[in-house]
Structure formats: structure tokens, C-alpha cells
Image: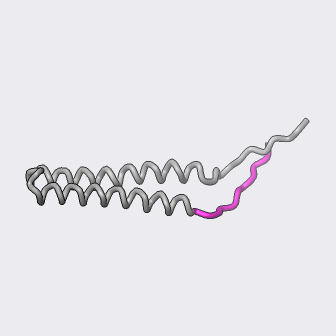
Amino acid sequence: YTVQMTEFSDNGPLVHGSIAYLCITLGLLAATVLLQSTGAIHPNSSKIALVTISLLGIMTWLMWTCAWLHQWHPLITPSYKSE
């Protein structure tokens, strides 16, 4: 087989997915602050929830980004010769 390099193209799905992860994370953070301000969550639990949700958003985005980038454009693609 021969090695063929591919060209990079539009990264729109990466941007849209990143915006979606940001919106979901900010929504969860806002819900936690709202619940804490109404007294439904103890302030200490609220602080733990804020840290946990922040880390959750960052780490799931990072995992999704790595998976997406690995599938975006493979560095080496096989080219089979017909016999």
C-alpha cells in the first residue's frame, strides 16, 4: 500500500460541540447557584458541586475533543491497489 496524506478542512463541528459543552456546563453551574441561593443546597455542598461540575465539564469536553480530533483526519490512510 502507499501512504497518502490528507488535507485539513472545516472544523465547524468542533466549534459547535465546544459551544454545546460550554452551554451545558454553564447551565449546570447556574442551576447549582440558584439552588444554593434558594436554600435547597447547603453552601458547603454547593461549593463541592461547583467544583465537581466544573471538572466534569472540562474533562468530558476534553475526552470528546480528543475522540473527535482522532477521527477528523487520519494522518495515514491506506490506499489499496486492485490486482
**Nearer to the camera, 1 or 16:** 16
- Give coordinates of residue 48: x percent, y percent: 17, 51
**Nearer to the camera, 66 or 27:** 27
If the image is split into quadrants, where does the N terminus sit? top right
- Give coordinates of residue 54: x percent, y percent: 28, 55
Q: From the image, give the main secondary structure of the stretch colored magenta.
A: loop
Q: Residue at x 52, y 59 (%)?
A: 14
Q: With respect to residue 56, does 27 lie above or below?
A: below
Q: Residue at x 37, y 60 (%)?
A: 23
- Give coordinates of residue 16: x percent, y percent: 49, 61
Q: Residue at x 40, y 56 (%)?
A: 21
View extreme (front): residue: 38
Q: Is residue 18 left or right of residue 83?
A: left
View extreme (right): residue: 83
**Nearer to the camera, 33 or 55:** 33
Was residue 73 drawn as part of the magenta stretch in this picture? no
Was residue 8 drawn as part of the magenta stretch in this picture? yes
Q: Residue at x 49, y 51 (%)?
A: 66
Q: Is residue 67 left or right of residue 82?
A: left
Q: Residue 43 lies in what quarter of the image?
A: bottom left
Count of number-bearing discs: 0
Q: Residue 12 lies in what quarter of the image?
A: bottom right
Q: With respect to residue 41, does 33 lie above or below?
A: below
**Nearer to the camera, 73 or 32:** 32
Q: Is residue 5 left or right of residue 46?
A: right
If the image is split into quadrants, where does the C terminus sit? top right
View extreme (top): residue: 83
Q: Which residues are magenta?
A: 1-11
- Give coordinates of residue 45: x percent, y percent: 12, 49
Coloring scheme of the render? one colour
